[in-house]
Structures are given as structure tokens and as C-alpha cells.
Amino acid sequence: MRPLLFILLVSIFLSPVLAEESCVFCHGNYTKMQELGFPQFHVTNQDVWNQSGMFRLGIGGPRCYDCHLGDKDNFTVKGSHKGVLKLLVISMDRLLPVDRHKVLPSLIPQQKRIPSMLLPRGKNIKTLLYHDRDPRTLAYSIEIANKTCGKCHVEEVKSFSRSNMGVQNLSRRYSSFTSPAPHNCGYWNHNYSIMNELTVEYTKEQVDVLQRKCEQCHTSCLDCHYAPFEAKHKFRRIPSPRSCSSGGGRGICHNGAEEHRRGAGYFREEASLPYLPSDVHVKLNLTCLDCHKFENHEILRKADCKDCHKKAEEELKKSVHSKLSCEACHITKIGGYQLVFWAPGVQFGIATPLAKIIYYGKYDLPLLIKDENGIWVPVKPVPHAVENINACLPETKVSFRDFPDRSSRDAYAIEACFNNTLFWIHMDKCSHGLREARNCSSCHSGEQKIISTWSMEGVHYPIKKPFAGKTIVVGNSSGLFIKIFNITEISKEDLTNAWDFAPWITHSYWKIEGDFSIVKKSDKCRENCAACHIPYPQDKERVHLVINPKAMRIKPYLEIVFIIAMILAIVIILKA
């Protein structure tokens, strides 16, 4: 009697685990999946629980239909898959989902050069999006998240959906190039008001393509927590750097903003354009979240070097470089965008008046500017222009792109506005790609001079022949001066439409007012700056204490003068 009672209790206790549904009936049977032609989709509940770590004794683990939806009680192939969420393989043609089985039969790493990348090369595929996306807009779907992840992680889905990343699918922040200031992202606004802001026709279909272009980058639950490059159903509670960088293997997340737009990414190497060495912290296995502290789903954008380098920061504060950020010295070469023009062209298979035409290359050094608190920070000065707009903005000095909810160290300066075209210099702050510090002479020459080498390959604009060029940036006490020119020939056929893809040919000289000079070292100075200015050159932490020898020599006399002045003041007060 007792053994029977025990068996009965165990069967009741484990009944959620032992119940079978149509998903496991097929997918749990390797022979059956092989007969159907999809052996790569053989999986059992136990496989899922082992890989995901989501099994709880007495409760069981998630079943297939908890995450993938579908009809668990229907045992036909078509019926059981009705309503099943699908992996979205996004085509370069209008950024629409395509039949994944033709291009990605199995979700495994596809590139030897970047092992975590799950996309194959050369198949006209833009990106890979996971199941918690709206297939029409490609945005994170709160509705799908509530039906899947939210079944168990109720508070987590609520928290994420309110976070800075979660609300991006509802954002109206960039609905215009002229308000609140020119920017790099292009228009993305669900209410289509932008259609009335151009001097040329801009259709709903063209707007929708650009909308999908933006939404493909904005993140969802699975982008951060799903780790398919480790196992089919592997999830991480704390996202890995791979997830932050490439969205869990789909190819783009912070890669886009850091490696391409800002040009000072963390991983770099194959992820950057062109190839650049990775941040020094990569070899130390530091993760993104080691520096960017977080609570629930709010991840701080700001990171402090002093969390690890406390002594170096203390010495820096006592130094003549107390108004210098760490990255101002420790970031050198920056890649990615070098010139950006929004003009008529072809974007993702559709003709549009707002194709984003990008020139890729690298600067030998960043430009240093003072932020709103007077701290010198490194930025990448990228000439921009947007054509066919019916509103212009006045010229400005360097301004910072602050938002109502936060301040920013990303800057811009409007350079000119004519011929329905707005010209500005985009200056995103650089934060990663940290390596050995630049030398003293690269700053202390009186004026800043940095050089970009770039190429135009015809992405989004069909040129007959690629060409290369240079951008020379000079910053001094009179302002910032930018000269753009080609170093290889542009075909005569392409020159007939040059204003669209190369407005710099006509508008080649850019200038904004301001003081961009840095103190010039004396002509009497020796080449070895450290001999006079760094009292502890052998101490890796104290090497950040940089002194002014002249000030140090007169300091004792100044102290004596101060003491005498105080004594005289006291005597005068006592006599009064």
C-alpha cells in the first residue's frame, strides 16, 4: 500500500513535468524530426531545462508553448504551429522578414572571423531578430513579452518596459532633423508628420523602411538574456559583453553606436570599420556591466574610471591636468563614420529622399573640446548634411545635445544652411577604445590638427567607381576649420550628381567659431616632457601627477607673501 501511495504522490508532484504536449511529441523524437527534414530542431524538455537553468523542483520548468506559443493540443504540423513565434531573418530588401529556412537553417554561429555572429555573409541579410519583436515594425513588442517572458518574470517585464531601452519602441525623440538639434539617427516617428517637413515627396512606405531601420537596433528581452552562441536554449541572468555588443549574436546593438557612429568601440577588431585594436580592458575580461552599474533594468550610461583606478584619479585631481578626462589621453585612433550625408539615394531596396550616405575610415586622433563643466573630452568631428528640408537653423558654436531627462556630452555645431540643405559638424563623445596614452606633443602644439582618411564605396548611393579622400581638421584660438578633399579620382559620370553623395565638393571648407587651442609647450622645452613635468615617472599610478615646474618654483614665495598679507590684515583689524 505504501509503495503505491508513494508512486501516486510522486506522480502528482511531478505531473506538470510529465505531461506531454504536441511540441515534445515531434521535437523530442529525433527520428521523426529527421524524417521531417529538420533534425537540427530536435530538443527535449530536459535539454531546455538543463541549458536554461529554469527548472524548479515541484514547479517544473517552462514548456515549449510557454515561450514559443502555438497550439500544444493540436498534433498536426500545421495546426500545432499556428501562432508560433518565429525567429525573424531580416532582408536587405525593405528590411522585411523572409523565410528563414532558405538562409538560416539552424541557429548556430555562421562566421569564423566573429564566432558569436549567427548571420551568414553574402546572402543579402541585414540582421536577425528574436521572437519578442513585432514583425511589421521590428520593434520590441510588450504584448509578446507579456505572453511569454512575462508569464514567469512579471515584474522584470514591467521594469524593462519602463526602462530607457524598453521605451525606445514608443520614442518620438527624433522626429525632425531641426528639433531639438541636428542629429545622426534620421527621422523615426510613428505619426508620419515628417512627410510634411521635406521639399520633396516622402511616402509612407519610405517612412516605414526608415522606421524599421531604427527599430532593428533597439533592444528586447532576448537580445540581452539569450545566448544562442553557447547553446540553443542558453539564457544569462547578467548579459554578457557579446550581448551588449551584438545583441546576443544577431549582429548589431552597441556595435552600431560605438564601433560605427562614435568609432571608439570596446571590442573593435573585426567589428570595427576599419580594423582597429580592441580596448585594453578586453584582455582583462572586464564586462560592460563591471563599469556600467545597473539596478533592475536601468543601466547607467556614465562609468567612472576611479572605481578601479582610484589612486590615478586622485593624482590627476592634484595635477595640472585636473580638468582633463581620462579618455582624452587614452583614446587615439577612432574609426567608423567620417562623413555622413542624408540625400536622395537607395536605402534597403527603395528609392528615398533620405538615404544615409556614409563614408568610412579613421582619424589618427580625436578632437578635444571642453564639455559643459569645463572638462576636456575627446570627440569625433564628422561633417554632416541633410538635403531637401524646408526649415533651417542658424549657425551655432559648439552646443551639447541635452534632453529633458538627461544631459549629454555629445555635441554639434551648425555650420551653414543654404539650398534647402543643413550643414553641421557632429561631435559624438568617444568613451571606449582605451589604450596607451597619446604623447604630450600631440596636444601641446598650440593648435589641434587631426587627419581622417576615408573611402566612399557606394553604399546606399550607386556610384560607378569607389574613391578615397581625406579630412583635415584644425582647431585653434580662432575656431575649428575643416577641409575635405579626394585623393583618388571621382569618375566624370558620378560628378554629374555629386551634390547628392558628395556636397563637400561644392562646400569643401567648413568653419565654426570658438577657441579650440591647447596650451603650447615652450620652445625651450626638451623632448622628454616627463623629465620636468612628472616627478614620479616610474610609478604607474603617480605618473598621472603632472606639474608645472615654474609654478612649483614660485609656490614657496607665494606662500610667504600670503602669510605676510594675512599678518598685516590681522594687525590692521586689531588697530581699527
Image (cartoon, rainbow, N blue to C red):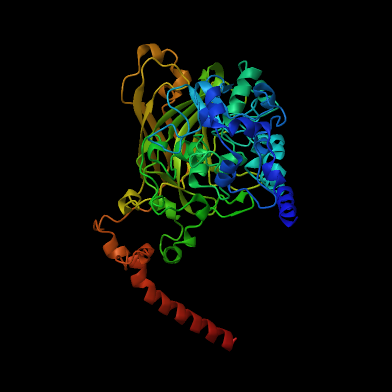
User: Where is residue 542 shown, x and y percent of the image?
Assistant: 37, 66
Say which residue appears at 41% left-offset and 59% top-offset: 321
457 over 57 or under it: above or below: above
User: Where is residue 516 shown, x and y percent of the image?
Assistant: 43, 46
Task: Choose between 105 and 421: the one closer to the eye.
Answer: 105
Location of the N terminus by quadrant is: bottom right
Task: Choose between 533 and 315: the one closer to the eye.
Answer: 315
User: Where is residue 508 shown, x and y percent of the image?
Assistant: 41, 27
In the orientation shown, which residue stands out farthest toward the front? Answer: 1
Is residue 133 at least partly visible in the picture?
no
Task: Choose between 495 and 514: the one closer to the eye.
Answer: 495
* Number of marks: 0
User: Where is residue 362 shown, x and y percent of the image?
Assistant: 37, 36
Location of the C terminus by quadrant is: bottom right
3 over 92 or under it: above or below: below
Say which residue appears at 52% left-offset and 26% top-offset: 34
Is residue 499 at least partly visible in the picture?
yes
Q: Quadrant of residue 144?
A: top right
Q: Quadrant of residue 558?
A: bottom left
Q: Is residue 190 left or right of residue 424?
A: right
360 over 286 or under it: above or below: above
Task: Choose between 32 and 118: the one closer to the eye.
Answer: 32
Say which residue appears at 41% left-offset and 22% top-offset: 505
Q: Is residue 482 left or right of residue 85?
A: left
